[in-house]
Amino acid sequence: MAIFKSNHSDFIFPQLLDSDANIILKGNSMGHPLIKKDICVTNDVTINDENFLIITGANMAGKSTFLRTVALSIVMTNAGLPLFANEISIKPQ
């Protein structure tokens, strides 16, 4: 984990929200950690408690990469790793 942080010095650690917060995840300019920063398309996302998202779009539009980015953000937060985002807040699960 220390090597990952050293290799990605521009990644940030997420702000952890209280367990009674209504927001599960709120990210600004989130990107997939395995895609180079200069070519990665970033996205904003907000997931509130008791909500769901419907992700639609054309083939090869980045839906799967977006979903992997959200899932990896949660897993990496639980592991104590920094994330590829400008700002991110997560409620630990």
Image: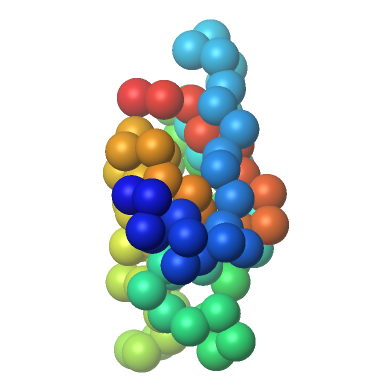
9 horizontally vs 55: left or right: right
Residue 32: quarter of image = bottom left
Question: Percent position (x, y) of residue 14?
Answer: 56, 39
66 horizontally vs 26: left or right: left
61 horizontally vs 18: left or right: left
Question: Percent position (x, y) of residue 53?
Answer: 44, 50
Specify how the rendered protein is coloured. rainbow
Q: Residue at x 32, y 71 (%)?
A: 64
How many tags in the picture?
Answer: 0
Taking depth in this image into account, of 50 and 36 the one nearest to the observer is: 36
Question: Percent position (x, y) of residue 89?
Answer: 59, 36
Q: Is residue 72 above or below residue 18?
A: below
Question: Percent position (x, y) of residue 51?
Answer: 46, 35
Q: Residue at x 59, y 50 (%)?
A: 12
Taking depth in this image into account, of 3 and 28 the one nearest to the observer is: 3
Q: Residue at x 58, y 71 (%)?
A: 42
Q: Residue furthest top?
A: 20
Q: Is residue 82 visible?
A: yes
88 horizontally vs 52: left or right: right
Tell me the quarter of the image containing the C terminus.
Answer: top left
Residue 41: quarter of image = bottom right
Q: Is residue 62 above or below residue 9?
A: below
Q: Residue at x 62, y 63 (%)?
A: 10
Taking depth in this image into account, of 49 and 19 the one nearest to the observer is: 19
